[in-house]
Amino acid sequence: MFFEETKPIAVFDLQDPELIAVRLMTALWPGMRKRLSLSTFALSPRKIDGRNFDLVFAPKDAKPRFSDWPGRRIDGKVERDSRHRWTGSIYHRVFVTSPPRLMSEREGRLAEVSNDDSFASLRIGLLWDELMEKVERSPTAALGLLDIAISRSPVSRESVAALISTMHDATAQAVDRLLPADAWDFVGAILRKMHGVYTRDQIKLVVSPAMRLAAQDPDGAIELLCRPVPDGGYDDLLPVIANGLAQVFDRAEFSIASAPPVVLSQLVSNGGLLARLSTNSPHVLTALSNAIPQLLHDDLLSLRSALLPLLLDDSQARLAEQFFATLDEKELLVEVKHLGDACSFGARLFFRPIAGRARQLGVIVQLRHTLLQYSWSEARDQFVAATLSASSDDVLWLISDPILTVEAANTHLLKVLQAASVSERRVLLQDRRILGRVSDEGADILLWVVQSMELQIDLYLETVLRLLPLLSGNDRVQVALTALDKCLGSHFQGDKSAILGTLFEVAASSVNVNSVCRAGLASHVASDVLSRNIIAIHSMSNQVRDRFVAAFDELAEALISRFVLDLSAEGAASCADLLWAAQSQHPRAAAAASSLLIPQLLRSKRYPVSIVVAAAFPIVYRELSAQDEVPEILKFVPFLYWDKRKAARRELVDAFLSSSVWAPEDLALTAYLCMDLDRILGRVRNAYGGAKYFDQMLERSAKLPIECREAVQAAAERPPSFSPE
């Protein structure tokens, strides 16, 4: 009636059928009772509404009339063994206990079936009761209970709640009693069945004993997590296993490192002790670094969230760098503050990856300002340095940011320049602001600049003058020589005489007079630059100037490459002084120079070079006086092919009288130095317009040295005793 296919039942020769019927009807659930058709006395098969009664009781002699009975026929006098495992239990409840019932009180509490008209529900209730008894001895019985709980409605909420504790106990038994492989199978099965039905807290409670199992069998734990499972199926088991593995990390380390990337990341993402231990394990760190490219975005973010706060050491740099590449602007700056607070920027291999990410995100300046909020330390300084590249933007920030001290900024600048490529260095150091901030410690940089870069001349000389005190030996001399070569033919600002003087003094022993003259005096040099250079040579120390005095003929050769001697008055005076010094110390060189200069001087009547005439002409004139023939050294002077001294006097006087800028007193000085005042002054008197010029010359001769002045005055007062021609 309860445990087999439903068919009509006829029972023969049974005593007290009424009592049996009453107890049975009492025990049945209302839904069953409503459907049941029963007769306590039937002499033949009976029907109701066209169907046979479900249960009829008949006397023995009526049995032949039931030969065509479609259901079961039972002899009430014959004893039989139980056909089902629950037969005895049902018999006792219906026909022995009082009041009659199909289920015990406990079963009634566990299953809400009283209104059910299905005998299947009764069988479920009985199975539930049976499994509840077995679960204390066999933990796998809990799986049957769980199947009933999640697949059939008759199980009450109270039963489900009570089942949580039962399943927890069963899991604990499985961990303690079964082989590890079987225990993991049990844990996996119960987890899959509960997933999506029970709350996360309930699942965590049930599988919590698996922590001990993970500690006992790390490989089994990893293997279980590798099995296919619905999405999120192991989410509640992962922290349990992670904690178990953490307890035996030394033994489980290689198993963890060998786990598939997703499993490894999911375990470590739970944080806690396993995450901390993993960040100090080279094997696990390597495995995690290799796993990251294979992770989905959400898995990567979970792993980053668990591990990044724990990464504080250079040994973790490879993994940390991969996390840094995923941070946004805000997250990156938060991470920098974390590193400063947690380890005082002790993880120095983190600096460049963070700086690179900040540059990608466009927050490199914000990163620097975040760093500068911390007190100075060597590590913080290195971090700031890592944010600097050899770009104009970075370097200009460096030298202009008010937070940095000048000393610190200059130190960083020097390191940037030393690490920069040649092309980067060229771009940076073209900027006067940057070049000017190179400290004295950067002498090698300054030396490179003046040797390798084409700077604007003023910036170049400014750099050279800074550099010279920092150099010694041959480097110092070579820099000065190169600077001289660059600036002698150029205009530049500043105290020109002081600058040239400094360069000449530094390079004194190595100055090549001929090279200097070609660079600073030849035809390609502008007039004002020519005068400046002559003045500078004249102003040098005796040691350097004497070298030019000794080689004044070379200086003259450079000057005559110019059609005229276009000196200023001051330049002409300096040139004359050098020539007079040469006459005293190196007369042959002075004579050669004078013979070269005279034709040029006579073409230079538009320039105030009469003092040079006064220095050069007497040498030539005296040579003409001393020899009957024109000296070999003077033969190329044009006027000397005429009547020697007479022609020379005429050329001299005509040049002075025709020049509006030559000083008349210089003619008087020339005549005095030629030691032929009477003839030369007589030539002046007799020249056209000479009388007026003569008076002017006498008046201005007051500027001459006293001996010269007196000699000129005396010659002017004497009447001519012979023809000046």
Image (cartoon, rainbow, N blue to C red):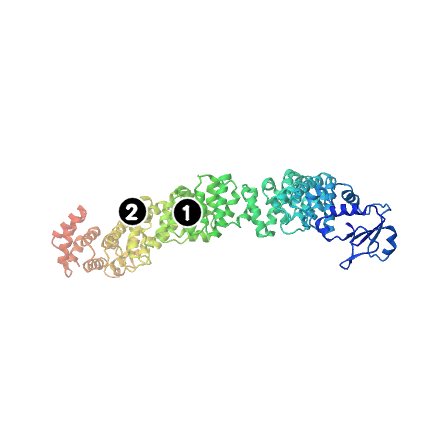
Answer few, some or many: residues within 10 Å of disc 2's Cα (few below 14, many 20 plus, some between 14 and 19). Answer: some
Compared to residue 128, the image places residue 67 above or below, namely below
- Residues 75 and 137: in front is 75
Say if mark 1 contacts mark 2, CB within 8 Å: no
Q: Which amino acid, by three-letter code, is at mark 1?
A: Leu
Among numbered discs 1 and 2, the one appearing first in the sequence: 1
Compared to residue 314, the image places residue 722 above or below, namely below
Q: Which amino acid, by three-letter code, is at mark 2?
A: Ser
* Quarter location, residue 373: top left
Question: Could you say where residue 103 lies in the image, as x and y percent from the top left?
Answer: 73, 44
Q: Is residue 395 something one can see in this rendering?
A: yes
SS category of the residue bearing label 2: helix
Answer few, some or many: residues within 10 Å of disc 1's Cα (few below 14, many 20 plus, some between 14 and 19). Answer: many
Would you name the residue on which mark 2 appears? 539
Would you name the residue on which mark 1 appears? 398
SS category of the residue bearing label 1: helix
- Residues 656 and 18: in front is 18
In this rendering, position of residue 334 left or right of residue 500: right
Question: Could you say where residue 56 lies in the image, as x and y percent from the top left?
Answer: 80, 52
Please identify the quadrant where the C terminus is shown. Answer: bottom left
